[in-house]
Amino acid sequence: MPTTLRARPPTAPTTPRRPRPPHWVLALALTGAASVVTILLLIGGYLVGGISGGTVDWITLLTSAEWSPAHGSFGALSMIFGTAAVGVLALALAVPVGWAAAIALTEYLPPRLARPLRTCVELLAAVPSIVYGLLGIMVIRPLISSVAHVPGGDSLLAAGIVLAIMIVPTVVAVSVDALSAVPDRYRESGYSLGLTRREVIRSAVLPLARTGMRAAVLLGLARALGEAIAVYLVVGRADGRLPDGIGGLLDALVRPGQTLTTKLAGPEPVLAGTSGPHFAALCGLGVLVLSLVAAATVWSTRVGGRRHEAGKPPTVRSASSLRVQQDRATAVLRLAALALPAVLLFAMLIILLAKGSTAFDPAFWFTPASGSAEGGVRDQILGTVLLMVTTGLIALPLGFGAGVLIGVRASARTARLLQTVTVVVGGTPTILLGLTGFVLLSGALGWGRSWLAGTLVLVPVVVPVVALSTSARVRGMPQELTESAMALGLSRSQYIRSVVIPYSWPATITGLLLGLARAAGETAPLLFTATVFFGAPALPGGVVDSPIQALPTHIFTLSQDSGDPQSMTQAWSSALALVMITAVLLSAAVALRNRREGERWTA
Amino acid sequence: MDSVISARDLRVSIGGKTLVGPVDFELPHGSTTGLCGPSGAGKSTVLRALVDLLPTGLVRTGELRVLGDPVRNGRAEAALRAKVVLVPQTPVVFGGSILDNALFGIRHVVRAPRQLLRERAELALQEAGLWEEVRDRLDVSAQVLSAGQRQRLCLARALALDPAALLLDEPTSALDERSRDTVEESVAALRGHRTVMLVSHDTSQVERLCDRTVHLGHLAEAQPSAALS
């Protein structure tokens, strides 16, 4: 029996007019994507432009150890050696500890104990590098000075240790993610075959988590190679030092040295101007750093995507009593490894609290600085807050737009390319952001050190974090959700507006808070674009022509004067204040993430 | 043209290789048609092919007409999906209240005052047999509903669009026995008023609810298999 369609309500015509599609969604996505690409093009343009502006003798740059702008000789071999040395040292110290601690955290500890520890590790990973630098000055340098008889203790070894401490939390956090992603049924089937815990980990868990744990190392390496400020404070910055043959290698480690990033963080970029052979050689260093770090970052995202290999069963079976003893031995070892980051955390906290106790005095937060190292840090906190607010306001829509585009069009080649670009921008050493900003904003546009310049160099720090956090959430959306929405006749932009955004905004905000926590501690970009060492007004007098104050650069300035106890007390207190600010941002992010984990839209 | 949907030589293929079909069928106005076949025969795939919601890589070929108008291979427009509405197997409840969910499709597709849209959504809830259970808690989060209620909410959401045809993909397979009965009742109540295509692996359910069936053969048998009972 054929029935006609029921009459539609009078105001709706037979072919109903559709509501106006939300065009702003598309505009936002494209703007976000364009911004990420533009950032990379600007950094690339600055480096390539700098190189083509003067002549770079690449052979000399890579093979000569003599760096002397006055004589026009630019050889970076000693800096390459320095970078390699601190990188290898940091990895050699951090990776075994980090891996073992991650295994202990996921496989040995009960969840009730492991969860707060995981949060602590994430907190530690977000501690600004300037604080690690301070730790290096106060604790590691004297240690090396007394053990290895190095005057002052400034050395490649000190830098390597500081970097190792800095990247352990990153290695642990990313490895823990990889390990806890292994489904429990693998462990269960291992135990049900009579394997000991050690054998289950070796044969069932590690083969599946291996790629993720390798990515953790590469991410840690990228962070170590790109770090400028923490290394700058302890490496000694001595040019032209190379080991005398293989035998002198160990000896060279306990001597002052120079790395690629510390050269760029020094005064030379400002002295070199924006053209000529000196500038070109510095850009050459920038290209070296960027390609090293970008290679490590991109590689780390690639290894994660590779197919998992099936775990090989252990071939040698030892006697059962021996197996149990081995099991116990490794358990002790791994738990001991876990103790190290925990001890580090508490040691850092105790040092911070002991040395920076002035930060608990409200007066320290609310009075302006006076003299060279007196008073409080009111203006620096205000400046940092101002920078964070404007950075967040600009980075949020851009990162969100790019993230949505990457997430929604995940299979398309352009989206994958855009993701790689985002990862590279996110991994760009921040010193390069600062130099790019310095050359473009101060040089080309004629801005002074200012609020807006500082904001613009911090935006590239935050945008990738927001974008990647958003895109991961969008890609994790259940397929049914998309299908249900599309089946009801939604257009693409309506689908993004009404399904994707409501589903993914908690991840976006989490990303924003994490990104801001990172940006709040950034020192290197602000040194060149936003702050001055002395004589800044309390509040910026203008948007582009008046310097602003900020906590990280304030700490940096104070720590230059490490002989003066008053300066150091002030530096530690400021560091504690900075850590407290980042901790607040970070705990908000963690809380938001934990809350939304329970949220489900499908049955 | 008497048929809401007519398909001739409809196939779903990947890289030139036919995965499902060819299949021919007509959905006359007001009919309830069952689409049967063994699991793996591609019942759900055929349903998705009708509204072009196939996974990436899969392509629909053959002739497809909706209300007499040919639908070109490739991307069916959003406007077409609002006319031929697919209700997927797993009930999805979007964030927001029960009313928000009932309004979800129509508010994106029809430009009309909110009050009018609300009336249509309420009518749809009645038609789906959910009204009595939710009438006094329309503003409550839809997450409180049971699985059977969720499935009927999805049905109401689709009915609010006043679709020319409704494609139900195994509407009861994710449900327990009691919820299954309530959903079956709702679907049975549509008989005669709505044009429905129902996918089910349960032949007794098809017998209970449908007045005609289309059989889909195995993947292996590449032969026309549209048999009308």
Image: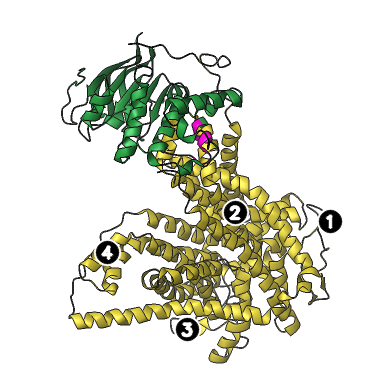
Residue placed at 17% from the left, 81% from the top?
A: A319
The tag earlier along the polypeptide, 4 or 1, is: 4
The chain under label 2 reads A
The tag earlier along the polypeptide, 1 or 2, is: 2
Disc ID at residue A250:
3
Q: Are marks 1 and 3 in contact (CB under 8 Å)?
A: no
Is residue B122 shown in magenta? Answer: no
**How far apart, in angstroms, are the residues tagged by discs 2 and 3?**
43 Å
Name chain B's colour: green
Q: Are marks 3 and 4 in contact (CB under 8 Å)?
A: no
Q: Examine the rendering and report whether any part of residue B129 can be seen.
A: yes
Residue type, numbered disc 1: Gly
Query: What residue did someone put label 2 on?
Result: A512
The tag earlier along the polypeptide, 1 or 3, is: 3
Foreground disc of the pair 1, 3: 1
The chain under label 1 reads A
Q: Do tags 4 and 2 sit on the same chain?
A: yes
- Mark 1 secondary-structure assignment: loop
Foreground disc of the pair 1, 2: 2
Quadrant in which the N terminus of chain B is drawn: top left
**How far apart, in angstroms, are the residues tagged by discs 1 and 2?**
28 Å
Q: Badge 4 local density, few (<14 within 10 Å), some, or many (20+)?
A: few
Foreground disc of the pair 3, 4: 4
Residue at the outermost left position = B221
Query: What residue did someone put label 1 on?
Result: A541
The tag earlier along the polypeptide, 4 or 2, is: 4
Quarter where residue A310 is shown: bottom left
Query: Where is A319 relative to B166, above or below?
Result: below
Query: What residue did someone put label 4 on?
Result: A188
For the record, the magenta segment spans B92-102
